[in-house]
Amino acid sequence: MKSLEVGILILRVYLGFAFFMHGLAKFQGGVENTAGWFDSIGIPGFTAYIIAFVELIGGLSLIVGFGTRYISALFFIIMIVATFKVKLSSGFMGNSQGSGFELDLAYAVMSLLLVFYPTSTLSLDAKVGKRKER
């Protein structure tokens, strides 16, 4: 086992956990509240339900390494939209109005790495892929 594989595993599990927790928070806090906030900033409110679902289920999928490239691509899109639509005006480090986009950008870059990295041997994707080859 290569140390790069272990590093990718750690990154994938952390990123999955972080997105899972964000999705869970949306459901626990009431997705309708998030939908209302989305409407107030010019994003259709129904997308809050889609994003919460993608974060929750996608986070779990990423933890086990199932659909890694597809889920990571969705996470990348979510974070880029969040950066440009919500956080860009606050700057990289933030201002007195709120936090900056450094964490959003970091999550986007981590997601992008998982989009382009070949399937990890330490993932469900690798096990499912081997089964298809037989």
Image (spheres, rainbow, N blue to C red):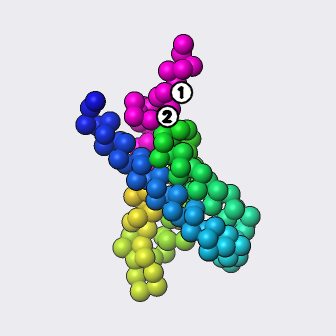
The answer to whether one can see residue 41 in this image is no
Instruction: State left or right for residue 90 relative to residue 41.
Output: left
Q: What stretch is highlighted in magenta?
A: 110-134
Establish if 86 lies above or below 81. below
Identify which amino acid the numbered label 2 is placed on.
Leu
What percent of the width, then of the height, locates residue 79?
A: 52, 59
Q: What element carries label 2?
A: helix
Observer-nearest residue: 15 or 117? 15
Circle 2 residue: 124
Q: Is residue 132 shown in magenta?
A: yes
Residue at the location (37% across, 42% down)?
A: 9
SS for dot 1:
helix
Q: In this view, does 92 lie to the left or right of 1?
A: right
Q: Can residue 126 be seen in this snapshot? A: yes
Residues at circles 1 and 2 in contact by the CB criterion of under 8 Å = yes
Image position, residue 31 (x, y; %): 67, 70
Could you tell me the amino acid type at mark 1? Val
Q: Tell me the number on the disc at residue 128.
A: 1
Which residue is found at the position 55% from the left and 38% from the top?
Answer: 67
- Seen at 53% across and 49% down, the residue is 60
Along the line of sight, the residue nearer the viewer: 12 or 46:
12
Percent x, y of residue 96: 41, 86
Q: Which label sits on residue 56?
A: none
**Rendering quarter of residue 61:** top right
User: Few, some or many C-alpha atoms within 10 Å of disc 1 (few <14, some 14-19, many ≥20)?
Assistant: few
- The residue that appears at 48% across and 42% down in the rendered structure is 64
Q: Which quadrant: the C terminus?
A: top right
Q: Tell me if residue 1 comes above or below residue 77 in the rendering.
A: above
Q: Distance between the residues labelled 1 and 2?
A: 6 Å
Q: For the view shown, which residue lies furthest in the left direction?
A: 3
